[in-house]
Image (tube, rainbow, N blue to C red):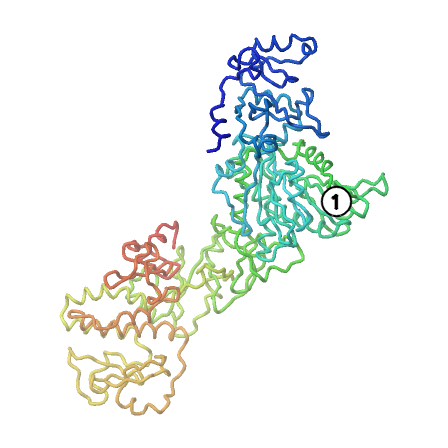
Amino acid sequence: MSAHTQTAEKGQNTTLLCQESYVCSGTDEAIFECDECRSLQCQRCEEELHQPERLRNHERTRIRPGHVPYCDSCKGANGNIMHASMTGSRQIAAVRCQVCKINLCVECQKRTHAGGNRRKHPVTVYHAGKAQEQEEEEGMDEETKRRKMTEKVVSFLLVDETEEIQVRNEEDFIKKLDCSPDQHLKVVSIFGNTGDGKSHTLNHTFFYGREVFKTSPAQESCTVGVWAAYDPVRKVVVIDTEGLLGATVNLSQRTRLLLKVLAISDLVIYRTRADRLHNDLFKFLGDASEAYLKHFTKELKATTARCGLDVPLSTLGPGVIIFHETVYTKLLGSDHPSEVPEKLIQDRFRKLSCFPEAFSSIHYKGTRTYNPPTDFSGLRRAVEQQLENNTTRSPRQPGVIYKALKALSDRFSGEIPDDQMAHSSFFPDEYFTCSSVCLSCGCGCKKSMNHAKEGIPHESKSRCRYSHQYDNRVYTCKACYERGMEVSVVPKTSASTDSPWLGLAKYAWSGYVIECPNCGVVYRSRQYWFGNQDPVNTVVRTEIEHVWPGTDGFLKDNNNAAQRLLDGMNFMAQSVSELSLGPTKAVTSWLTDQIAPAYWRPNSQILSCKKCNTPFKDNDTKHHCRACGEGFCDGCSSKTRPVPERGWGPAPVRVCDNCYDNRGIQLDVAELPSDEEGGTLIARKVGEAVQNTLGAVVTAMDIPLGLVKDAARPAYWVPDHEILHCHNCRKEFSVKLSKHHCRACGQGFCDECSHDRRAVPSRGWDHPVRVCFNCNKKPGDL
């Protein structure tokens, strides 16, 4: 530790002592300060020192508690030492040199006692009290007080270039502003092209030239994102933004961010250094006005209602000051004193077909810089004048400002596709509207961004067209429509009053059914032997609806006969396990006949093997050849080959010996109807796997159910091999943890997360079936 520091610590005082030592030897308490003697004096020293005639007129002041003298070494602009009359500009002393017997401020101490022998001079340290600071402030002029208030102001990143708010919450926002939560504030923001000196303008307009917002002479933009600072003098939140035409990454998002800042501002400064006002200035303000009225006014009103704010956020848009700095050209309106700059600006807007209707006012403030630096005094006066006007935009608490910014950020956020970046407008609708596009017709949603979070469905301006891929035709019951009700109906395999097995039998015989909740079954596709009419012409009316990404409304497979059969398998297995083998075979034969393809011979007509003529006994198994449809014993139909002409696909299936030997000969098979091929035959394939297990269910299940399930899986179900963990609790599936499909959403769940049972009529499940925890919580019919 240096000698200077040691002496300084020993010399720290709580009571000021006499600095003359003329009578008292420096032990008495100081009572007076003589500015011309430049010392603190006790009562005795003051009387003795000023007895001579030439010293009697010295100006002496009585010392108050906590008093600290001024620096004796501070010099004025002319190089002379300042006297008492100049104390308003002098610095408070920090120490007194006991050798030189002068009071020094920090700067003067560094300047005069930083080197040489003076560095070792013992000093006494002064500690200014609150009373002294208050006395100092009272001696300052108004301008100095304002400068002092802004000395500790710092800026902080409010929103980054990806539109992410960088303050955690409302309290964090107020803390970084360093203001009172109850303080009523206004917001001033600045816009302009990159390189036009926006940050420099804010520093000189609000903070007396201090670099609160970073500036840089480099080519790269020094302002990335949105920065904010609090001006304690004018009670204003000052916001600095990125320059236009400067960003190369996330350009669309950064441009949209500018409008969010504009929407929460009370006053906007548009800074330009162009010698003549360019069209992009008017285009920017015109597009911003249109976007504000179209997208932001409604959202700000909703925020006012949602947050219960007393201060309306969208009475009118902000005021605008165009700050125009020129070097070689005259300012707007200077040629003719009768011309008002604001009138010329309005005429320019009209010529460009831009209408800044959203802004409460537009003012022009110009300055011509013959020699630097720029004169910001005119802009400062214009800003202060606009801030005093509370007729259209009143000040509000900082929490209200944060809530408004948060609401706009939540609503209008997310990436903007690259194909939407080239536009003639600064703020196209694509920046603020939902980006979803109908999969069927390609029309976009007209709702605002993120409207799905509030439960608002997609909506398009135009009608949709039918697409076979998405089957986006919606049926409504015609009888109910004529009675003033709109009831949607869907084709399905069975009526709600039919049991799963009986419904499948009716489906195989009579086709699909259309059932209305009010009118009951109104249509069956094969109700008559011939002459069945299209339901559109008789019982239902149709409407084509849009197909939006992420929705499964038109991806529903109501023709789920195969899966309905599998769902009933466990019940049948339990029932059959309690019976003898004879009744089991009877049930198997009945089931086979109910869902057999049309070309199969019924089990009741098969009394012996078609090839070897061996009679079938009650316990013998009858096998159908998939090619010819006749019945055979196991020995005469043990071979397999693909039978695609019958709709069995490329996989090998059971055929008789004759059909196997004639596999090169193409069968003359009439084309099957699409509904029978897609419904009955798939159900038959599953039924075949099921009925084969019924005979052996008492002992073991020897059919690979995984393959059966995949064959029967409805289109909207997630395939088993893609399900690795529970969609809800995220538990990984294993041999011990089985996976189950929710009949409503089609996702895979564990048993604990899908133990509820509800009917899902929109999917064709009229009886209670397995649904997941989330779907069970949905109100109304699934």
Q: Can residue 560 be seen in this snapshot?
A: no
The residue positioned farthest toward the front in the image shown: 117
Observer able to see residue 443:
yes
Residue at disc 1, secondary structure: strand
257 versus 743 height, above or below:
above
Q: Nearer the viewer, residue 33 or 413?
A: 33
For residue 49, what is the image quadrant? top right
Q: Residues within 10 Å of mark 1 (few under 14, many from 20)?
A: many
What's the amino acid at mark 1? Answer: Glu
Which of the pair 225/587 is nearer the observer? 225
Where is residue 85? Give x, y as percent. 69, 20
Residue, far left: 580
Establish if 411 lies above or below 706. above
> What percent of the width, then of the height, locates residue 397?
55, 33
Is 96 on the left or on the right of 338, as rendered?
left
Above or below, comparing residue 564 to residue 131 in the picture: below
Residue beneath label 1, please?
325
* Side (left or right) of 693 relative to 255: left
- Position in image of residue 207 (x %, y %): 63, 36
Q: Residue at x 41, y 75 (%)?
A: 674
